[in-house]
Amino acid sequence: MLIWRTSGQFIYASTVIKFVNFDTDLRTPEEKLDIIPKPGPMQGSSFSELDRLYTQILLVYPDPAVLVHTLGMILMFEALPRSEDVNSPAIMATITGFGEAKLHVVLRALQSVTEIQNDPVFDDADDNEPNGTNIRLVKLSHRSFHNFLTNEERSGP
């Protein structure tokens, strides 16, 4: 079924693997894999199965308002000229008013459709060994997801 749904699109298979593999919530990989075949919108385009997958991934997050605002921020930042740290969670949290903790939760849920670049955090006592990371940059992982989000016929409400 998954092979048929890929319709020859590597991005479909890649997104499924990321979605099932990332620890985005308290579901097991098997439970996440069961989410994918659930019914979704079928628009009758070459991206129908990919759109259905994107929809299923987005429906997993329980707070649609936070999700929409976060995705809107990512889209807005992608439209701006590149500037270092402009689309970091700290700036997104300040603009949306959600707070960094909530923003980190939604970003975890979006790991299969976003790219998150981290910078190491150093503690001088560790002899220059990193003791954690800070998210520096968040962007959409594939142009097809951008197109999905910005086309209401494909993404629906």
Image: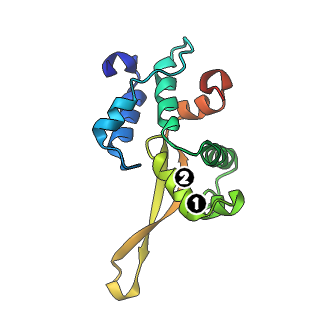
Within 10 Å of disc 2 (Cα), the crowding (few <14, some 14-19, many 20+) is many
Up/down of 81 relative to 90, above or below: above
For the residue pair 111 and 42, the one nearer the viewer reads as 42
Label number found at residue 89? 1
Q: Amino acid at mark 1?
A: Pro
For the residue pair 47 and 99, the one nearer the viewer reads as 99
Secondary structure type for disc 2: strand
Circles 1 and 2, Cβ within 8 Å, touching? The answer is: yes
Q: Which quadrant: the N terminus?
A: top left
Up/down of 7 relative to 99, above or below: above
- Rendered location of residue 105, percent (x, y): 50, 55
Secondary structure type for disc 1: helix
| Residue at (46% x, 52% y) in the render | 108
Q: Is residue 55 visible?
A: yes
- Rendered location of residue 37, percent (x, y): 39, 23
| Residue at (62% x, 63% y) in the render | 99
* Sequence-wise first label, 1 or 2: 1
Give the quarter of the image for residue 85.
Answer: bottom right
Please name the residue that numbered disc 2 is placed on: 138
Give the quarter of the image for residue 45.
Answer: top right
Q: Which quadrant: the C terminus?
A: top right
Up/down of 124 relative to 45, above or below: below
List the single residue furthest toward the top: 44
- Rendered location of residue 98, percent (x, y): 64, 59
Q: Amino acid at mark 2?
A: Val
| Residue at (54% x, 33% y) in the render | 145
Within 10 Å of disc 1 (Cα), the crowding (few <14, some 14-19, many 20+) is many
- Distance CA(mark 1)–CA(mark 2): 8 Å
